[in-house]
Image (cartoon, rainbow, N blue to C red):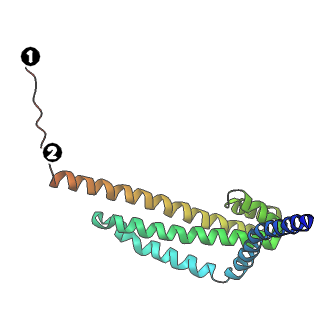
Amino acid sequence: MEKLKSASGMAAGYLLLFVFLSIPIFFLLGAAEFSVWALDWIPGAFAIALGACVLLMPLAIIPASRGLAANLFSITSLVFGACLWLYTLAFTYLEWGMLAVVIGVMLAGVGVIFTGIVAAIFAGAWGVLGNMALLFAMFVGSRFLSAWLAHLAEQRRMREFAYKTPSKVTLTRNSDG
């Protein structure tokens, strides 16, 4: 009876281990299938984010609205990054299969971008590689622009704070030498 309890406990443990190990695989399969489905709307999302960037340029020029522009450029960079990740995930999945997707995801999650670039080079899909380069440039560019605008907005806020609340410290010179 004791051996039966031990065997059933081991079987339950192995089943639980199998379930926990299979959950990430199901998520990856779902993400790969979703990315193939998302290929239809990625150009639309890119166009909307690009249009938003163009419309945000006047806000970036006006010093009082740079903080808002920084936040909105940060959102557009997230859209560009999601489009890039999904695009490279779909291309890697369609070109090299699930094993390459698993390897790419195991490289800190963003390795799918690297595997997608390598797959595009080996496949000679230069148009796809150009799309990846454009998405990457827009992602990095909007991220840096967002950080720079946030820095400028913070500098402006600190100058206004210093002007409105001057220091009460009095500096004196010691005449003793």
Q: Position of residue 109 (x, y in %)?
A: 68, 61
Determine the image quadrant of residue 176. Answer: top left
- Dot 2 crowding, Cα within 10 Å, few <14, some 14–19, many 20+: few
Q: Residues within 10 Å of mark 1 (few under 14, many from 20)?
A: few
- The mark found on residue 176 in the picture is 1
Is any part of residue 124 visible from this angle?
A: no
Residue topped by disc 2: 167
Q: Nearer the viewer, residue 2 or 148?
A: 2
Disc sitting over residue 152 in the figure: none
SS type, badge 2: loop
Query: Horizontal and vertical percent for residue 78?
Result: 53, 68
Per the model, the C-alpha gap separating discs 1 and 2 is 26 Å
Place of residue 48 in the rendered image (x, y in percent of width and height, measured from the top left): 52, 79
In the depicted structure, whether residue 24 falls above or below residue 155? below
Q: Secondary structure at mark 1?
A: loop
Q: Assign the C terminus to one quadrant of the image.
A: top left
